[in-house]
Amino acid sequence: MQRRVLAAAMWAGVLGFVGSAQAAPPPASAYGRFPAVADAAISPDGRRIGMLGGQDDKRFVSIATIDEPNVPVLPLGAGEGLGLFWAGDDHLLVRTAFWFSPRPKEMHRFERHISITPEAKLATRLLENETYSQHFYNQPIMVAPQDGSGRIVLRGGANGGNEGTVMALWRVDPATGLGETLAKGAATTRNFSVDATGAARVRHDYDTNRITDVEAIHLSRPGQGAALWTRFWSTKLGGRERYLGYSAPEDAVYLFLETGAIVRKPTSGGDIEVVDRPSPDTSPYMLWDHMRASPLAIVSGGGATENYKWLDPELGGVHASLSKIFKGKEVWLIDWSADRTRVLFNVSSRTSPDAVYLYDRGRKEVSLLGEDYPELKAAPVALGRWLTFKARDGKDIQAYLTLPPNAAPGSKPPLVVMAGEAPGVNSRADFDYMAQFLASRGYAVLQPYHRGLWGFGDEFYEAGFGEWGGKMQTDLIDAVAAVSGEVDARRPCIVGHDFGGYTALTAIALQPDAWRCAASMGGLSDLGLMMSKRRWFYDYESLALERLRERMGGTGKTKLSGASPARFAAQVGGPVLLIHGDQDTEIDPEQSKVMADALKAAGKPVEHIVMKDEAHYFSRGTNRVQMLEALETFLAKSYPAS
């Protein structure tokens, strides 16, 4: 019991928790802050816990040793920390991001790992001097072999001779950052899978020459060396079949087939075994153990629930026990010690901020380590519910409706529609800071998951192909009609980020009578401009463009113009708010400028905000707070909650 209290008190001191009753709604800074617990990881021996948190220019990584009072801290300053990973027991790896601009109007975002000691001292940056690896935007960790060396295997680049820079696997020493090449791919290689030792076992290639249009899995047999590969499986590029991963203990690959079955296929050529048949209205994926290179569970869900089929009975039992303790909330296993006696897990729900806990199986104790939004601990809760409605063509669509806290019985609060992002929807019961913020300001918030979003099965996803500006938009109007009995749904405002920003602008431009106002954060406005930029950046025949063409239903001039809201600025039916980060490498900031210029030329009310030093996902707390404050002011003028 003493350790349990110590752990909670320790992290409370580091994170500076706040929790006092408030009569007025919490300020925007309570919702928009950088999460106090952005990530957590436990060392393989189970003795140390690393935590990533803080605020913008005061972000930090802290390392606590269980049952000891000291908590050394490494300040990250304004650096963007993204995640944590232990390389053995003596080095904690911090995934960070930075931007590079080789010439004007061209910005690239790179992710790299730095290594720190248990004393929170900087050791090195991984593969910093490897020229060919610098060409890759990210260098994901593939496995941490439990051989006592502390070395990890990550994906980078290497000299492919006549093929130029190719994808490669590197075995890296976290103490020095230096590595050795384990395997090289071909020009068409997009990924590898490895066994528990880090040896390359699967090479995943895409052939996009428009003759074969194939994605293929190649196998390297033990003892052959990485140079000898044999094609094991292939399927049509862009089809429903997909590779899910390689299981080292079983020496088998997992595949999702056209029939909807998830199967295990031994590399020795034995019989294929059906492992699961998820419901067709879900989009299943698999969880994997990064230490053992083994499958943990098949997760499927679509909206209100996520279902687990555990392939690892030990961790499955841990998950079941914790789910009973936190009934009604989503439990997500984050990390665990090598012997699995200590487990870090996240608890989430739509009505309370996510929290991270430590579960000590031997002592049967659960300790709170920290919460994402501590300032909201005593704030009124905005409650919500899932609903299903029929679109005008009969398709079933799901949505989530959040109502303002303390709303008077029988009242009909004004409605704000939050459009979904692409390419998918996270169906976990996560706390949505923007939805909760808007609800705290007196708005009902409707989040429709229209066709074309990933998460509700392949058929639902493919139903959105070619419907940009079409049925994707009418699904939103049908969603508003479905809740008109309990909210004020007369010409609501629509807001969105990423693809949701595009959806919001398309709504106010192509359906001006249905919407009062629109706000787009990092959204598209001109599809033709986007395609021309991506052709230049990615090459016309790249995989990224091929998949984008498929989703849009073609890229002819008429098609692109007809679904570009900037081309219809003259018929926009209400005021528009545009917010974009100046370092957005996902959707060019020019997209918001083009829309703003078109609206101004048409004499339409528009506010255009460019956020300094901000990327696509609004990862800086100060900018997220500014975004929320701007949105609150915009709605107060265009669509006051009172």
Image (cartoon, rainbow, N blue to C red):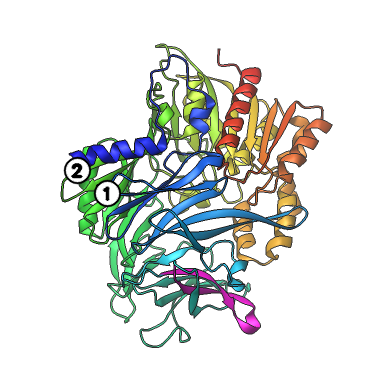
Of tags 1 and 2, which is closer to the observer? 1
> Magenta-highlighted stretch: main secondary structure?
strand
Residue 79 in the magenta stretch? The answer is no
- State the image quarter where residue 541 is shown: bottom right
Q: Out of 560 and 331, give the one closest to the viewer.
A: 331
On residue 66, which mark appears? 1
- Element on which disc 2 rests: strand
Q: Decide: few, some or many residues near mark 1? Use Cα within 10 Å; few <14, some 14-19, many ≥20.
A: some
Asked whether residue 545 is in view, the answer is yes
**Residue 503 % position (x, y):** 61, 39
The single residue placed furthest to the right in the displayed view is: 601
- The magenta stretch is 152-174
Side of 358 where 170 appears, left or right: right
Figure quadrant of the C terminus: top right
Residue at left 54%, top 30%? 417
Q: Give the mark, 1 or 2, whose residue is nearer the N terminus.
A: 1
**Residue 592 % position (x, y):** 71, 40
- Element on which disc 1 rests: loop
Three-letter residue code for mark 1: Ile
Residue 162 in the magenta stretch? The answer is yes
Cα gap from disc 1 to disc 2, whole angstroms: 13 Å
- State the image quarter where residue 222 is shown: bottom left
**Residue 475 % position (x, y):** 54, 36
Side of 618 where 558 appears, left or right: right
The residue that mark 2 highlights is 365
